[in-house]
Amino acid sequence: MEKLDTYKVDLRGMKSDSSTHSWEVDDAFFDAVEATEVHTGHVRVCLTVRREHEAYELCFAISGVIQVPCDRCLDPMDLAINTSETLKARMGAAYDDDGQWLTVPEADGMLNVAWYIYEFIALQIPIRHVHPDGQCIGLPTAAILTEDTDTGDPAPAADPRWDKLKTIFNNK
């Protein structure tokens, strides 16, 4: 995790009520996070932290391009990312993430936002990601389209149970 120390934000040591951090996320980041969905890309992250009494609002602005495999041809494809996300944090005895609030240990006062950045990026990947029509040039699609169906092998014998079911169907 030492590679991700640059993504630590010191909440307790904030000198003013607002601070801004920015990072250029690249392949080294995705390797360090041990990402499963995204391995390459170039994304700019801007984080604005606002302190309001005992709470912190972390506003992320994320934009850039990542590469994911096309579901159709498995070749890499570029996917534009552009999102804004917000987290709310507060100080407490131990780290906790209840879905609404992040609780940061008061003794440490530091929050590593690397995993949150990765999650925000990964959540922008659509369920189905394919090249536009006509742009898939990978081997799997070409193999499917040019497959010769006549292999010279004799057709397997039909199962007699299916023949019996066909007669029942045809009688109706």
Image (cartoon, rainbow, N blue to C red):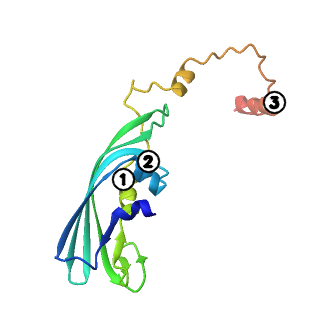
Task: Tell me the kind of residue under disc 1.
Answer: Ile
Where does the image place residue 133, in percent across and percent down from the top left? 38, 27
Q: Is residue 101 something one can see in this rendering?
A: no
Where does the image place residue 150, in percent across and percent down from the top left? 68, 14
Say few, some or many: other residues with alpha carbon within 10 Å of mark 2 (under 14 / 14 to 19 / 20 or more).
some
Which residue is under mark 3? 159
Mark 3 vs mark 1, CA separation in Å: 51 Å
Which residue is under mark 2? 38
On the rendered image, what quadrant is the C terminus found in? top right
Task: Tell me the kind of residue under disc 3.
Answer: Asp
Indicate which disc, 1 or 2, sits on the residue closer to the N terminus: 2
Residue located at (39% from left, 72% from top)? 99
Say few, some or many: other residues with alpha carbon within 10 Å of mark 3 (under 14 / 14 to 19 / 20 or more).
few
Q: Is residue 45 something one can see in this rendering?
A: yes
Q: Secondary structure at mark 1?
A: helix
Q: Secondary structure at mark 3?
A: loop
Residue located at (78% from left, 16% from top)? 154
Residue located at (42% from left, 83% from top)? 94
Label of residue 121 in the image = 1
Q: Is residue 44 left or right of residue 26?
A: left
Indicate which disc, 3 or 1, sits on the residue closer to the N terminus: 1
Residue at the outermost front position: 2
Q: Please tell me whether mark 3 or mark 1 is closer to you in this view.
A: 1
Q: Nearer the viewer, residue 161 or 33?
A: 33
Indicate which disc, 2 or 3, sits on the residue closer to the N terminus: 2
Q: Secondary structure at mark 2?
A: loop
Q: Is residue 139 left or right of residue 124?
A: right
